[in-house]
Amino acid sequence: MTVSTEGHTVKRYDQQLGNLRSLVLEMGGLVEDQITRAVQALQDEDLVAAREVVARDHVVNGFDVRADEEVVNLLALRQPVGSDLRLILSMAKTVTDLERIGDEAEKIARMTARMYDGTNIPHAKLLRDVASMAKLAVAMLHGALDALARMDVATALAIAKGDDELDGEFQSSLRRLATFMMEDPRTIGHAIDAIFIIKALERIGDHSKNIAEYVVYLVKGKDVRHVKKEQLTMDDLDS
Amino acid sequence: MTVSTEGHTVKRYDQQLGNLRSLVLEMGGLVEDQITRAVQALQDEDLVAAREVVARDHVVNGFDVRADEEVVNLLALRQPVGSDLRLILSMAKTVTDLERIGDEAEKIARMTARMYDGTNIPHAKLLRDVASMAKLAVAMLHGALDALARMDVATALAIAKGDDELDGEFQSSLRRLATFMMEDPRTIGHAIDAIFIIKALERIGDHSKNIAEYVVYLVKGKDVRHVKKEQLTMDDLDS
């Protein structure tokens, strides 16, 4: 924290840092809601809801721009060091990943709108893995945001350690889709759409992992992004 | 630039800023080389070369970590404002996109290693669009890096305006792959790999577009990421 003889300056600065964090968490909530709604629209075959998700992506982008402006302001006016600087930089990186998660939610919604806008609608079996994969992806994002809100390194490290379950579901879903296509080549068009939907969910897992890594950096000051994390413990982070 | 009465402090600061920019451009060159090699390995059906690309991704990640450390150092020690702050923030963002382009190159190489590691190798027609798409993707990245090196906003804006050509190629390649799969369902497994390869190339275009947007921000101070750019002119950037 900046040392200042003027109490109100410190207070205002702390407030600004808090505002940035709130802004990022609010953006996180919105993005989580976008994924949930996109997947719900897919399951309900609800074109209107899908288009609402697409239309709402500009709100996500608005958060992206506002957060970035706030980052520039804080860096320029407050010249932070130490843990304050880490907070600001982690928020800047988190925002980038949140914006891209928002894009993936938008893609799912676009795909939904395309698939159900006509008479040739996809066979339900093509999309049977989407619900469970979406649940895993949303849980990872929710966990990462929760770790950020509570500065909880243990949870963050657990999420950063991997998305093995989501990756495993992705691979087996992909194999099932390939089988469906071989059995019935008429499903190929929709199956390719389904591949992009599960790919979007898999990427949401990757982005959530990134956010968890920034939480570790924020609290512990250690950059664990390109470190093998299988064996990494909380003790390693303190050394 | 920080105003200082001590000439050598200013000089050292300028040097550090220059070093960061060189580091990012060097990383850009490496990443460009990774894409080119990955695509070449695919075309030559060269397993050894593909594995070399995979192995070299850790060098890309090393640049990512070093550049980020340099960013933190510069922000903490030099407390930059104005155009210096913009330079540092654009470099930080560029590095993130370069690292992810590196990941896409690695994915192409992994896919190559998998496809040619056995007797059931893919039919050449499945990969016929890869060369032209790779050429477009590399041209976009090269252009964005060149714009960064020369602080050339006109080129950056042209690249930021879109990857319509690459997107168009991606869509038609996807349609061709769907047709191949329908005509000969035995190609489905390899065709799915081919889909992920062209998807990786399409994403490299997206990341290159992002980098071009940071160049506009760096030189003009305008955040054009979520702005409709079709009608955007150089004059708009000066207003």
Image (spheres, coloured by chain):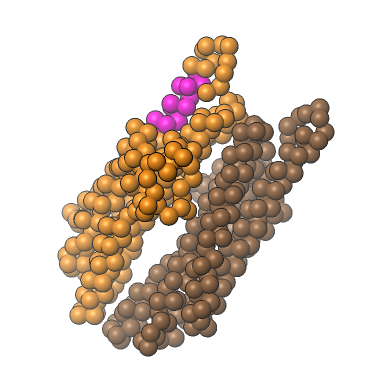
Chain colours: A brown, B orange
Residue at image coords 47%, 53%: B226
Residue at image coords 28%, 69%: B174
In the figure, is residue B101 to the left or right of B117?
A: right
- Up the image or down, B234 lies above or below A110; here it is above
Majority secondary structure of magenta residues: helix
User: Residue A23 in the image: x percent, y percent?
Assistant: 65, 53
User: Residue A48 in the image: x percent, y percent?
Assistant: 51, 78
Q: Can residue A169 be seen in this view?
A: no
Which one is in front, B153 or A107?
Answer: B153
For the record, the magenta segment spans: B12-23
Residue B123, located in which quarter of the rendered image? bottom left
Residue A122, located in which quarter of the rendered image? bottom left
- Up the image or down, B200 lies above or below A127; here it is above
Which one is in front, B211 or A216?
Answer: B211
Which one is in front, A192 or B5?
Answer: B5
In the figure, is residue B79 to the left or right of B168?
A: right
B212 falls in the magenta region: no
User: Residue B210 in the image: x percent, y percent?
Assistant: 42, 48
B22 falls in the magenta region: yes
User: Residue B10 in the image: x percent, y percent?
Assistant: 52, 17
Residue at image coords 56%, 60%: A59
Which one is in front, B214 or A91?
Answer: B214
Residue at image coords 37%, 33%: B151
Residue B164, located in which quarter of the rendered image? bottom left
- Up the image or down, A141 lies above or below B182; here it is above
